[in-house]
Amino acid sequence: MVSIGIGLNQQEYKKTSLGVRFLHNTRTLKTNNSIFSTEYNFTKSLIDLKNLDEVNEYFSNEEEELKKFVKEKTKQKSKNKFHIIESIISISDDEEINTLTLEEQKKLLIKKTEDYISHLKNQGIKIYQYSLHFDEGHLNENEEMKINRHIHIIHSNILESGKSFTKSLYEKNKGISKIQDLISKTFQMKRGEVESKNKHQGYKNYKRNKQQEKENNIKDELKLNTLKKENQELKNKIEILEKENQKLKKENIDFKNLLNQKDLKISTLEKTIKTRRENADSEKSYVASLFEKGINKIAQKVGEEAVEVVIEAKDNNNDLFLSESADLLFHYLILLQAKGFKLNDVVDVLKGREK
């Protein structure tokens, strides 16, 4: 079943005059929203004016007449902000209505609108104009251009009793809902969702919103790609660190086995360092990797181990002190070889200082 929606553009006249709306509906004033042919548009107006100033003057006079009418009927000054309003009835793009030709749709909607207008007139409401538009459109989810079928009705907001038409329906903020029920009954069409927050969008707004949505999606995709790249970089770094850790573990085991020899001599340790430097793979040997990184890196490691020795010397844990001392000696022997010396060269310097 075809569904409908209703909106009352009361606030709109703070920005645009009734005259502008009136001439917009007749397409006397051009509209950027007109996309399709105006062939099936239909307008019926109480007045035949095409000059904006004349139309505005006409509605200004009508406003004053309605204020007088309200005062006569209610014996009070009118408190209504809007004595003339525009109702917009939106017709959904359901499969049922699309089974009809545009000409058949036009005839159907004119008849339904006339029925609804008769209902308004019976309550004393004055109809100035109603227009049926088939020339405006929107892009659907599949980026297809679809017709926005809708009806504009410019009418008085005053009942025969002098009371406001909209205020009489607005009980506990249910006015729009009641008007939708009224139109649904008159048009014999399914009404839209109760208290739906959906709003009609013009072609320009819809296109702008779709463009913004695309830009947001692109930004999100770029952020996601950046995060994926950073994640991969972290994985690569972790993999490198894990390899280095495995390398250090193996190197540590080898040197522990060497140090556990009862008759271990410094010369044996120096020979092992030299062998690793000359023959070992830098990706597998910690010693070889240090030599590959150069003298600055080796000197830095000696400095780090020296600081660790100083820190442990201030505590009472002898095991940690000896362990750090061993690390310092080991790295010092590497530094000596990097400079082309052995520990005996240092011993010779010390011997030369004896008096």
Image (cartoon, rainbow, N blue to C red):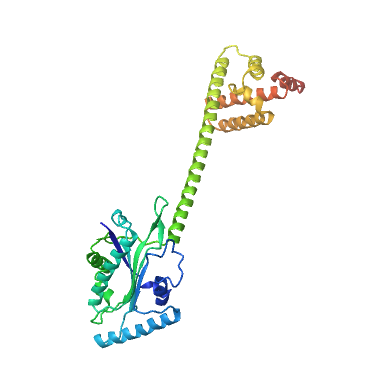
Between 282 and 224, the residue placed more toward the observer is: 224
Decide if residue 24 is on the left or right side of residue 84. Answer: right
Residue in view at x 39 percent, y 65 percent: 39
Q: Quadrant of the C terminus?
A: top right
Q: Can residue 9 be seen by looking at this rendering? A: no
Compared to residue 181, the image places residue 212 above or below, namely above
Q: Residue placed at 33% from the left, 86% from the top? A: 65
Q: Is residue 164 visible?
A: yes
Quadrant housing the N terminus: bottom left
Q: Looking at the image, how many numbered discs can be counted on the residues?
A: 0
Q: Quadrant of residue 270?
A: top right
Residue 68 x %, y %: 31, 87
Residue at x 23% of width, y 63% of height: 188
Decide: is 242 above or below 183: above
247 or 154, nearer to the observer: 154
Q: Is residue 129 above or below residue 98?
A: below
**Residue 319 x, y percent position in the rendering:** 53, 25
Residue lying farthest top? 263
* Image coords of residue 249 (percent x, y): 53, 22
Q: Measured from the top left, where is residue 313 in percent x and y?
A: 57, 30
